[in-house]
């Protein structure tokens, strides 16, 4: 039992759920409660007694940072229910370890919590071992409905913290015990079967930090501590079931006959059956999804922020449309990808800069400002386009076109999220504006580490330093981009034979053309194709282009529109191709061009990227040439050796495959 040094207190002790029963129940008395500086904490184990016990033991561990609570009790749900009904109990803090399923006992505990709340305000922290609200967002899980009701009673005067978790691994947690019993079957689990596991020590630390934070806020008289609700998710680290079973197995000795049977099952292909069984079953049974998932797709900003809290943002990999994973094969072995493209999104075209957004947020609050924005009529002659980050560029191009507006520049492929534009230099072949990032005027993001909304605008040091910087835990929510009246284009194509690096530079420096790009279909070929696009001011409709891109560029968007073809296309590229884009400074381009015909590159596309002065940009201080290179995966090593030898400092596009 935990006691805090000098505060050792005979009136506070714990009752652990005990199979033999026969516990004596004594509660903290008024004397404890009224003692200055003593915070009482009640632990109720309502589903996972082992976990509750481990938490209590951790509170006794002098090597861990100690929470403020000095008087701690752990009780069974029955004791808690009985005591609350007789109004015999009080506590400053109550921590309830819940089960994944709602039982009559859970409902009684919730009734007890309501009873307690009606007597005096307290801080209630509920540990809910279920991610169903994230994995099955179309239906509210039963526990969430009850939590919503509880929120109303507790938050009238106290603080409610709902902490959802992945599977918790601690010495006696229920999942750890179950795994321990099945450890001999670990070879039946494929390494691909992964989910998220929370280390018990981490969970306990988070509980203590959250409760201590409320105490600190209360002590400082902060208004947020008075009556509030906070919902956060602790996914934990992504791990394969197999590795978790192996950790558990290191201590065990299995019978020989058992391991022979498992070997036979492995030979019969049972691991694959099990894997596909879980995957297929999870399509129809939502509760199975927690056994195997890699990606979450939140449906509201509220849900998104509950995932991107200070304790969890390190285990989350934010994604836009998720081409990084799907097309380029990025891997985040220990993290969970959280996609932003399912978030509800709105666009607004405005005649003036949206730089007054901050003032409106300050005056009205974020929700009211967003509401006001969405109700405002779109202005047909707008110069600024404000969009929610989860929308796709494809959608925004079509929205703008309705008002006869367009972006200054567009890439060949528009199935990209708008939020990505701040983190990846998404570019086309514009001679005057290179990247969509160059047209971003302001952004609103949420800092996961500080749990704060930040609005920053072009010209601010924060804007300059955070653009193209993915090392910080920042979730982009909204952005404003400059837009222009829609143009029509026509193209002039020419073929050049054996151009020098200087010839190429001259072609790309042509500012008469609105867009310039160069293609070479095989590195060894002596000729290049040059495409120069001009604004068609006559716009008589004959041979005019809506978007300045060639026939190959137009293919990518079409492929994405057909799900089967798009899935095959992405699978092919991530499995067999190496698609990298170099941002070459002038001297680096000379080296690249001198050697490129000897390299096993299948396709080269060259475009100009102008200097942007952004701290983390490859083109921060000088114009670059972007060399978009496509080759088969088998040629990757030859190419990487060339880069390491001849272009050791070259930067690449962080939105594609990395060097
Ligand atoms: C077929 C094809 C053609 C392409 N052609 C071009 C081209 O012509 N020009 C060009 O420039 N590029 C091109 N690309 C590359 C493309 O621009 C990048 O791959 C881009 O990153 C894809 O966008 P996404 O939304 O899928 O990004 P994701 O892979 O989902 O994310 C990219 C990065 O942005 C971050 N991010 C995204 N949204 C947010 C958010 N809301 N908050 C915080 N971080 C966020 C992610 O964490 C990640 O680091 C092409 C890609 C493909 C597949």
Image (tube, grey):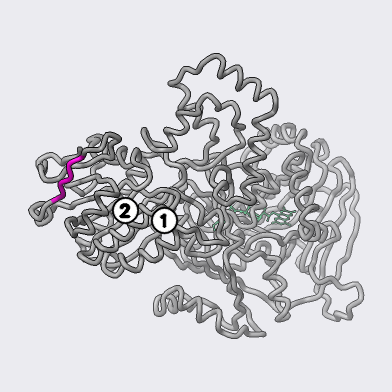
Identify residue for label 1: 232
Labels 1 & 2 near each other (Cβ < 8 A):
yes
Assess whether residue 26 is covered by the magenta stretch: yes
Q: For the stretch drawn in magenta, what is the main secondary structure?
A: loop
Residue 508 visible, this orientation: no
Question: Start and end of the magenta stretch?
Answer: 23-28
Give the answer, above or below, for where 560 lies relative to 255.
below
**Mark 1 neighbour density, 10 Å: few (under 14) some (14–19) many (20 or more):** many
User: What's the residue at 66%, 58% (across, down)?
Assistant: 426
Give the residue drawn at x 19%, y 61%. 219
Q: Which residue is mark 2?
A: 210
- Give the residue displayed 13% in from the left and 39% down from the top: 5
Report whether the residue tagged 1 is closer than 8 Å to ligand 1.
Answer: no
Q: Is residue 595 above or below residue 625?
A: above
Q: Considering the numbered disc 2 on the image, is that residue within a helix, a strand or a loop?
A: helix
Give the quadrant of the N terminus.
top left
Which quarter of the figure has residue 144? Answer: bottom left
Q: Position of residue 504 (x, y in %)?
A: 80, 53
Q: Earlier in the sequence, mark 1 or mark 2?
A: 2
Name, please, the residue furthest toward the top. Answer: 256
Tell me the element at label 1: strand
Residue 576 appears in the rendering: yes
Q: Is residue 416 above or below residue 637?
A: below
């Amino acid at each position: 039992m935990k006691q805090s040094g000098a505060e050792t207190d005979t009136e506070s002790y714990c009752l652990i759920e005990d199979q033999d029963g026969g516990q004596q129940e004594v509660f903290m008395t008024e004397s404890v409660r009224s003692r200055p500086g003593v915070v009482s904490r009640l632990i109720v184990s309502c589903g996972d007694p082992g976990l509750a016990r481990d938490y209590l033991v951790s509170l006794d561990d002098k090597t861990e940072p100690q929470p403020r609570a000095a008087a701690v009790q752990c009780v069974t749900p029955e004791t808690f229910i009985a005591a609350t009904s007789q109004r015999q109990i009080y506590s400053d803090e109550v921590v309830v370890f819940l089960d994944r399923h709602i039982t009559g006992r859970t409902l009684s505990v919730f009734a007890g919590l309501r009873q307690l709340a009606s007597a005096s305000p307290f801080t209630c922290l509920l540990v809910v071992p279920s991610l169903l609200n994230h994995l099955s967002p179309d239906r509210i899980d039963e526990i969430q409905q009850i939590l919503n009701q509880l929120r109303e009673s507790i938050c009238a005067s106290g603080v409610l913290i709902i902490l959802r978790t992945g599977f918790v691994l601690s010495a006696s947690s229920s999942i750890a015990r179950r795994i321990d019993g099945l450890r001999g079957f670990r070879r039946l689990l494929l390494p691909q079967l992964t989910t998220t596991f929370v280390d018990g020590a981490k969970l306990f630390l988070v509980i203590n930090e959250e409760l201590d934070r409320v105490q600190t806020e209360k002590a400082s008289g902060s208004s947020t501590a008075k009556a509030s609700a906070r919902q956060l998710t602790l996914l934990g680290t992504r791990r394969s079931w197999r590795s978790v079973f192996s950790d558990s197995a290191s201590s065990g000795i299995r019978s020989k006959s058992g391991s022979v049977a498992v070997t036979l099952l492995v030979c019969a292909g049972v691991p694959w059956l099990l894997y596909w069984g879980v995957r297929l079953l999870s399509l129809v049974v939502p509760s199975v999804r927690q056994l195997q998932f890699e990606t979450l797709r939140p449906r509201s900003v509220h849900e998104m922020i509950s995932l991107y809290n200070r304790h969890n943002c390190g285990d989350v990999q934010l994604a836009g449309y998720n081409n990084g994973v799907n097309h380029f094969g990025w891997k985040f072995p220990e993290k969970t990808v959280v996609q932003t493209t399912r978030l509800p999104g709105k666009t607004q075209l405005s005649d003036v800069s949206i730089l007054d957004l901050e003032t409106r947020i300050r005056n009205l609050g974020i929700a009211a400002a967003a509401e006001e924005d969405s109700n405002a009529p779109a202005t047909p002659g707008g110069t600024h386009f404000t969009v929610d980050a989860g929308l796709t560029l494809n959608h925004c191009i079509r929205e703008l076109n309705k008002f006869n507006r367009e972006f200054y520049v567009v890439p060949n492929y528009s199935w990209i999220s708008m939020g990505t534009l701040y983190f990846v230099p998404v570019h086309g072949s514009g001679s005057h504006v290179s990247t969509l990032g160059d047209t971003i005027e302001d952004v609103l993001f949420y800092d996961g580490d500080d749990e704060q909304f930040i609005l920053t605008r072009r010209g601010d040091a924060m804007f300059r330093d955070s653009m193209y910087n993915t090392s910080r835990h920042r979730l982009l929510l909204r952005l404003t981009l400059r837009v222009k009246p829609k143009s029509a284009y026509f193209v002039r194509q020419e073929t050049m034979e054996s151009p020098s690096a200087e010839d190429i530079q001259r072609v790309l420096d042509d500012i008469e053309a609105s867009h310039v790009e160069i293609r070479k279909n095989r590195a060894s070929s002596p000729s290049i194709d040059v495409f120069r696009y001009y604004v068609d001011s006559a716009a008589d409709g004959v041979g005019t282009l809506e978007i300045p891109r060639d026939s190959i560029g137009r293919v990518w968007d079409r492929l994405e529109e057909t799900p089967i073809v798009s899935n095959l296309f992405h699978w092919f590229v991530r499995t067999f191709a190496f698609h990298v884009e170099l941002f070459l400074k002038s001297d680096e381009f000379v080296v690249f061009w001198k050697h490129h015909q000897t390299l096993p590159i299948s396709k080269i596309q060259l475009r100009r990227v102008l200097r942007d002065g952004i701290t983390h940009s490859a083109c921060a201080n000088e114009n670059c040439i972007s060399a978009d290179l496509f080759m088969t995966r088998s040629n990757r090593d030859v190419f990487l050796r060339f880069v390491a030898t001849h272009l050791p400092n070259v930067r690449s596009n962080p939105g594609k495959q990395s060097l």
